[in-house]
Image (cartoon, rainbow, N blue to C red):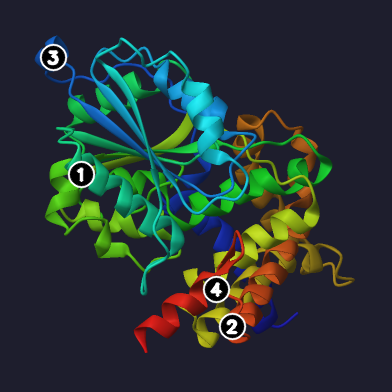
Amino acid sequence: MSEFLITLAGVPAGIWLYLLLFRGGFWRERPESGAREGGDNSWEKSWPEVAAVIPARNEAGVVGEVIGALLRQDYAGKLTVVLVDDNSEDGTAAEAKAAAGAIAEGDKHRALHIISGKPLAAGWTGKMWAVNQGLAETQRAAIGAKYYLLTDADILHAPDSLTRLVSRAERGNYHMVSLMAQLRTDTFAEKALVPAYIFFFQKLYPFNWVRDPKHKLGAAAGGCMLVRSAALKKIGGIAAIRGALIDDCALGRAIKATGPIWLGLASNVTSLRGYPRWSDIWNLIARSAFTQLNHSALLLLGSVLGMIATYAAPVLLTINPDPGVRPFGMLAWAMMAGAYLPTLANYKRSPLWAPFLPLVAGFYTAATIASAIRYWTGKGGQWKGRAQAEHVRKSMT
């Protein structure tokens, strides 16, 4: 076998060696435990006021449980929840109001505001436009929040969630604390594909790099973001990312420019939204994957080739009839499976799923190509009946 073929066969193993040793240890992430960090704790005598802003578009069936859980937080400070009903057609606002019931009545530390969203403005994505209106409501109501909890209408917070978020932010002097919510893995499709979704996100945005003030990488998980109001004001408000489809990571980058941020895996924040069918997860990826590539055909080509070299090549080399290249494939495949094991453990999935990561990667690659096709045909960023990528693109031209 020629030196060229040996070098070529060693590429996948080299890729995985780099990922394991020099990519911020992304694959070793574990859910945060809520253990206290060091730092000044004098602030605990007066817990800061928080305003939770929730954009909701056709979220009946889950929003009631979410609102109830927020209003029942064991947080010692004042909490105001602002729900922005984004032109829902399924009684979202009524369900939220009914769920609140008497929880907030007579409690000066808890309040719920429900506002009706205005028609989508040019240049804004639907979610960011709703969040902007929620933030404006906190100003109108003179809510003096030190922090904004930007969360979703399908994200369920355990009773101690807000206490742990604020405690981490105060003790670490973070300008943002964000948690990747635990996703559902009930159906076969979810069990096969959802852990990989988290794995790929961690690989793309190594949490250790995000948490490192000296590293330029910024990111966040949109379902749970606690943001200092002063930092948000410093970047020009949510309008700074008004057209972002991957708004959480855009906000993470912007806030990190003002000070340190923290990103981790949640142990007490879960998503109520399921993606039970293969097509549901396909659409989840196809909605924004091409946006991640800056709508570049060249980056798409590079991404596809990179996925082939990283995930498909180890398998192809392992089954290659040439005994000289098979060890390289086996080594790369073993490193790949080993890197995936902690994520599977976080989701209580069998380690037997690990060798099948190349098949899952193929699914994600195909969905990414579909994302590009949707964008080119004017259907990019599809969410709740809106082709948001096309809407933003037209407003900018």
- Examine the rendering and report whether any part of residue 270 can be seen: no
Q: Gap in Å between the C-alphas at discs 2 and 4?
A: 13 Å
Q: Gap in Å between the C-alphas at discs 4 and 1?
A: 28 Å
According to the picture, the residue beneath numbered tag 2 turns out to be 378
Dot 3 or dot 4: first in sequence order is 3
Residue type, label 4: Phe
Disc 4, SS: helix
Taking the spot 30% from the left edge, 11% from the top edge, the residue there is 107
Dot 2 or dot 4: first in sequence order is 4
Whole-percent x and y of residue 294? 45, 77
According to the picture, the residue beneath numbered tag 4 turns out to be 290
Looking at the image, residue 224 sits to the left or right of residue 236; the answer is right
Dot 3 or dot 1: first in sequence order is 3
- Examine the rendering and report whether any part of residue 247 can be seen: yes
Residue type, label 1: Pro
Whole-percent x and y of residue 320? 85, 70
Q: Gap in Å between the C-alphas at discs 3 and 2?
A: 51 Å
The reply to whether dot 1 and dot 2 touch (C-beta < 8 Å) is no
According to the picture, the residue beneath numbered tag 3 turns out to be 46
- Which corner quadrant holds the N terminus? bottom right
Dot 1 or dot 2: first in sequence order is 1
Residue type, label 3: Ser
Q: Nearer the viewer, residue 373 or 377?
A: 377
According to the picture, the residue beneath numbered tag 1 turns out to be 260
**Crowdedness near tag 2: few (<14), some (14–19) or many (≥20) residues, C-alpha within 10 Å:** some
Which is closer to the viewer, label 1 or label 2? 2
Dot 3 or dot 2: first in sequence order is 3
The vertical placement of 157 against 331, above or below, is above
**Crowdedness near tag 3: few (<14), some (14–19) or many (≥20) residues, C-alpha within 10 Å:** few
Taking the spot 67% from the left edge, 57% from the top edge, the residue there is 332
